[in-house]
Amino acid sequence: MTTILAILFLSFVLSFSLTPLVGRLATRYGVLDKPSERKVHTQPLPTAGGIALYLAFYAPFLCALFFSNKLVDEIFRESSLLWLAAGSTVVFALGLFDDVYRLSPRIKLLFQSAAALLAYGGGVRIERLEIPYCSELALGDMSLPITLFWFVLVINAINLIDGLDGLAAGVSLFASLVLLALSIMGERYVVASGLAGVAGASLGFLCFNFNPASIFMGDGGSYFLGFMLAGLSIMGSMKSQATVAILMPVIALGVPLMDAFIAPIRRLALGKDPFQADTSHIHHKLLKMGLNHRRAVLWIYGATILLGIAALVMVQIRDERAGFILLVLGLALVFGVRKLGYLEHLAVDRMMGYLNDVSDEMGLKKERRSFLNRQIAITEAADMDEMWASVIEALRFLKIEQAELRVNDFCLGKPSNGRQAWSILEVEESPRECRQNILSIDLPLIASEKSYGMLYLKKDLRRDSLSHYTLKRIEHLRRSIVRKLAMFEAQSTASGDARRGARSGKE
């Protein structure tokens, strides 16, 4: 315990001492975070605080080279720590480079995954999961993708929540303290020493980053903290009786993980790029609810502390009471998400609508397959009469009361008035007051800027309202008709050429 406390203290002192120095250097060289509509600060501030965090974390371990005790010897025998350090250096350099030159999200994701692969190769991996009230689940070949996902998720969770003064540093501090306690309870003292370094560095930096901040950690700092929390939480969950479940780190990091998980879903639901930045993160929502910067941060601190306490309690009571705590946390999550206004984007009916759309496009729904059979019948028709009969069947399926097809003469292969019509209900003769209930659609039969005619449809919405897919089916029908008319035209042209060729031969 003495060594762990010494690492925590030294990391704090070094972070507290280095942060102002790094801030002055960043200002001198122009590494500044300028105000924008997504930022809450109003003047440029240095954004290279991650350098202080990185140095404050590793310096105590370098000092430990000159001392020898059981824990220090064990730390330097743990080869996986070297790979974890290599990965953390990659993401720290990536974030620092991004603070200066701005990289694309996909490039950052690539290097984050590469750093996670380094840690995985060194043995920092999720190989099994403990499901509450169930036996352990061995992951096997799924270990690699799940481990990479966990690293990338936590890295970006800390990065995304770094939007208010002191928020990312404070959340990292409280989460690392909880994981530190869990590691000590599980007698994972090597991991505990690493978490002590994270806690000490975060606390020292927080003294200058809390509102009003004089320096930001930047992507270099948030990537580094996220990577270390991800890796150390995995190591703290391995080979331990008290912390075998990765569920405990998930709970301890609940607030940033929830924000990181909802963000891409929210953006996709709104038709945006999942990597596109926005102003709908948890801290932004709290500000929009009327909280000032400091109160919003303190609310998130409070939520993180409560989740940490819940994780610590659940480790001690591995019975039905733990299940009750999980239930309470789940209800609190639903309430919180609803209160923040996320359910309007993630409502069950909207998600089900999205899934229905996907299944319809893929042809998984019976109704879509039935209509597809009618489309196929149109494309297989031998002549115009047969095609029109198939169109009629498709329109009956859609409950269209009146339809008229007018095609250009060249499509029919013979002179005509270019008119084909079919009608069940003479909508035109309906009383005037009922005509407002009639949906009229005029569809140009166009392909590649070439017109084949028009399709006129009318539907009485009193008899049958529009379903979610009616207009989509009508467009599918239009395309099928156009394709078939193009085939008729091609056949007519070929026949005409053949007849002209035959006459030329006789002459």
Image (cartoon, rainbow, N blue to C red):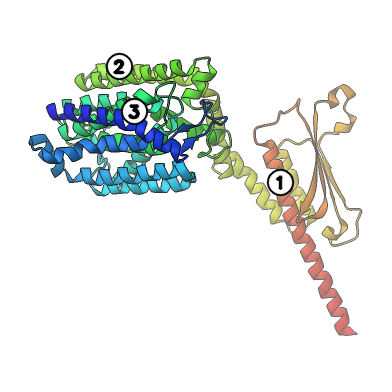
Residue at 75 percent across and 27 percent down: it is 463
**Disc on the earlier residue, 1 or 2:** 2
Residue 411 percent coordinates (x, y)? 82, 58
Whether residue 140 appears in this view of the structure is no
Whether residue 3 appears in this view of the structure is yes
Left or right relative to 204: residue 63: left
Q: Amino acid at mark 3?
A: Phe
Residue at 72 percent across and 28 percent down: it is 464
Q: Residues within 10 Å of mark 2 (few under 14, many from 20)?
A: few
Element marked by disc 1: helix
In whole angstroms, how far apart are the C-alphas of marks 2 and 3? 37 Å
Is label 1 or label 2 in front?
A: 2
Q: Amino acid at mark 1?
A: Leu
* For residue 113, above or below residue 327: below
Is label 2 or label 3 in front?
A: 3
Residue 375 percent coordinates (x, y)? 67, 49
Left or right relative to 21: residue 234: left
Residue 445 percent coordinates (x, y)? 79, 50
* For residue 150, above or below residue 311: below
Left or right relative to 71: residue 37: right
Residue at 43 percent across and 35 percent down: it is 47
The residue singled out by tag 2 in the image is: 324
**Disc on the earlier residue, 2 or 3:** 3
* For residue 80, above or below residue 335: below
The residue singled out by tag 3 in the image is: 205
Tag 1–tag 2 contact (CB < 8 Å): no
Q: Quick one: quadrant of the N terminus?
A: top left
Q: Amino acid at mark 2?
A: Phe
The residue singled out by tag 1 in the image is: 477
